[in-house]
Image (cartoon, rainbow, N blue to C red):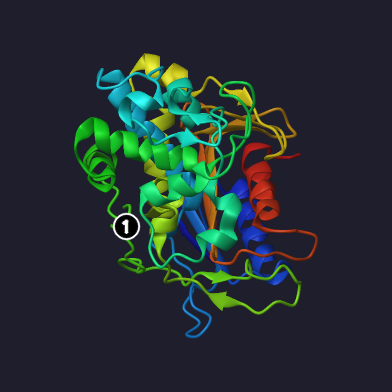
Amino acid sequence: MAEFGSGSGGGRRAVQRLLDRAVVEAGLPGIVAAVRDGDGEWSGSAGVADTATGRARHPDDRFRIGSATKMVVAAVVLQLAGEGVLGLDDPVERWLPGVVRGHGHDGALVAVRQLLDHTSGVHSYTEDMDRLSRFPAYTPQLLVELAMDHPPDFPPGTGWRYSQTNYVLAGMIVERATGRALEGEIDRRIARPLGLEGTYLPVGGDPTIRGPHARHYTKMTDPAPDAAVHDATELDPSMFWAAGGMVSTTGDLLRFLAALLGGRLLGPAEQQRMVRTVPTVDWIADSAYGLGISALALPCGTTVWGMGGALFGSWTYAYGSPDGAHLVVLNTNGDWGGGGWADPIGVFTDVLRAEFCPGR
């Protein structure tokens, strides 16, 4: 185990015990957590970043953040809406003519905001992983075309279903509206202003993670309890792009979430729209979804805001109080669990309870 920085002792000791338990009982390779509240920042870790060398996990490790990418992409879209570059009620067809079409899909009936809160009904291309895995390279257009080969999940605005295609389309709209690459807009609008030195969207199919990082170990290719562990550190992130391709650190995610929830990235109107939620179906229990961000109700009655993300060998949670003053970010560099924790979500939920529901 390792602890870094400052912060209140009692609650952090409980968090550190859970990090140790995640390695000892759940069998995860390593885990790292970062916490910010009125007493300062604290980081803790357990286990290793590299099973071959035994190097311990460290708060500065970079890792793939999966669907936590959606918070960043949604923030960029909301900034553009606040600047009047686009409207949240604009039909997707206005920005991407002819792209959302086929098998009942109609981009003229889908609003930009429905992409961000997953009420569009647009089918998720990841539902067809067998076909997806046959391609040697990926473009956003290809990912959307795969989704268009299936009918919509429901008419726009009449249901809710998590769809990776929604955020690929949102990223494409950012590029069309600005005339610039999405990775550049994220860097210009989010990473550089907030000083997020370890945060970026990889360009194209670059399989590497720049800078110091944990190895990512996965069993996702085989659900059996005794399945072999594979090193998935190097992979083609273009399969996930705006839906889940970003790299970050626990410290960077603390700063981003503090700025997002604290109202420093968006105007008041866009801030209010971001947290206007819709109920989720067959997703995370006790949750609701806004524009790129989710609300999670804890058993003690506290609601935290943020997003989780999973990509082969890397699971991330980033949640905080509505004002961004109290935040927790966690990452495991393995995607399995044990000891009663079916996957890292059990670990993360217990950490959130320990931090936001002390004494419960």
Return the residue nearer the eye: 131 or 277: 131
Q: Position of residue 134 (x, y in %)?
A: 50, 66
10 Å crowding of disc 1: few (<14), some (14-19), many (20+): some
Q: Position of residue 227 (x, y in %)?
A: 70, 76
The residue sitting at 28% across, 57% down in the picture is 203
Quadrant in which the N terminus is drawn: bottom right
Quadrant in which the C terminus is drawn: top right
> In what element is the residue under mark 1?
loop
Residue 317 visible from this viewpoint: no
Question: Is 303 on the left or on the right of 244, as rendered?
Answer: right
Instruction: Please tell me whether residue 107 is drawn above or below residue 203 in the rendered image.
Output: above
Q: Position of residue 98 (x, y in %)?
A: 37, 33
Return the residue nearer the eye: 165 or 329: 165
Return the residue nearer the eye: 100 or 187: 100
**Which residue position holds label 1?**
202
Q: Position of residue 34 (x, y in %)?
A: 49, 51
Instruction: Please tell me whether residue 135 is drawn above or below residue 173 in the rendered image.
Output: below
Residue type (three-letter) at the residue carrying disc 1? Pro
